[in-house]
Image (cartoon, grey):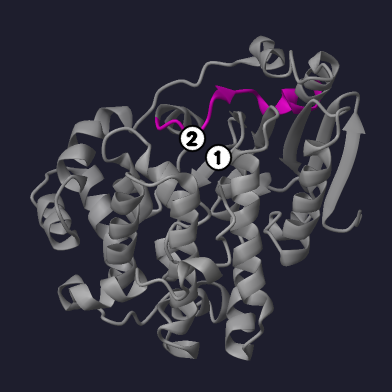
Amino acid sequence: MSESTVLAEQRGHLGILTLNRPKALNALSLEMIRLVTAKLLAWRDDPQVGAVLMRGANREGKAPAFCAGGDIRYFHAAALAGDPTLEDFFSEEYALNHLIHTLGKPTFALMDGITMGGGMGLAQGCSMRIVTEHGKLAMPETNIGLFPDVGGGWFLARTPGHLGEFLGLTGHVLGAADSLAVDWADALVPAASMDELVDAIAAATAVDGVGALSAVNGFHAEAGHSTLREQRALIDRVFARPDLPAIVAALQAEPGEFAAGIAKALAQRSPLMMAVTLEQIRRARTMTLADDLRMERGLVRHCFHLRPGAASETLEGIRALAVDKDHAPKWNPPTIAGVEAAMVDAFFASPWPAHAHPLRDLA
């Protein structure tokens, strides 16, 4: 097991994985995906491991992070260079997401701090998703011309009402109370209690996993007020509309600062990828997790290949945010009115026949 990017230990009958790229906010590399997958498979089949816990390493004096997502600088460089490992990254990441959901043993995610994108893909499949007062949870992919992947369609579609469309299109960041309110977290535990919590879970976990989940009971803290709860009626009213132009029109008709803030966020996102995201989430409502991940695997390939190289919305979004850092992406089309149905439909045509799909074996 590499000591560089993922640390593994077994404490009693609890397997503990620590994502260990703190300078990169524990953003996932292909090496990390492979290390986590290998260890989870080994622990799944090990009768001495009753439960598994995942957490992120942090830097002294810096904002904490469980996992900030995938390594988008790598995405940009690999796509421009034609690096075939980019294909491996997404196939293996999505297979890992599915593995966590189906591991068959109690699993914990300690979402202390930033948990976004790929970090959400790791956490949302866990039996017990623990957030701290530092929690910053989001699926912000439309901000870089991508869509909420890693099973995002599936778990966004299962949030209450039309919160999934709202969270997927805007990339809105949730604190602890809102994360609990939208069912992205199961418990709030103070960050100062994290080490004690891990010790308690390890001590309580029997060889068959019994006792693991109940160990959290003594650590619950009050989450406080959820600001999203008071906006639910507005969110459901607006984001239930049939398409992106109708959503924007409904939003513009709403008074108040909250609606204005949402409108401002949507105006900065890729119109095309917002339309793709809306279709993704609505299709996912009637899909199994495995079928959603297969759909998303096709979508992400199209993100890099429908318009190769710098013409990709995704590469343009990453360029603007993380490479040139001018925060001025040139989206194509630049407006929602310019998005045609055929542009969106092209993303949902599978690049592979069913028998050759890279995730064909997901059950």
Q: Amino acid at mark 1?
A: Gln
The residue shown at (32%, 67%) is: 268
The residue shown at (32%, 65%) is: 276
Magenta stretch bounds = 182-196
Residue 197 placement (x, y as % from top left): 76, 21
Q: Regarding mark 2 in the picture, which secondary structure is present there? A: loop
The residue shown at (33%, 79%) is: 331
Which mark is on residue 68?
none
Q: Is residue 194 magenta?
A: yes
Residue 125 quadrant: top right
Residue 48 placement (x, y as % from top left): 89, 27
Q: Amino acid at mark 2?
A: Trp
Of labels 1 and 2, earlier in sequence is 1
Structural distance between the alpha carbons of marks 1 and 2: 7 Å
Q: Is residue 12 magenta?
A: no
Q: Regarding mark 1 in the picture, which secondary structure is present there? A: loop
Question: In this rendering, is residue 80 above or below 236?
Answer: below
The residue shown at (27%, 51%) is: 261
Which residue is the site of mark 2?
A: 184
Residue 58 placement (x, y as % from top left): 76, 46
Q: Is residue 74 visible?
A: no
Which residue is the site of mark 1?
A: 124
Q: Is residue 343 visible?
A: yes
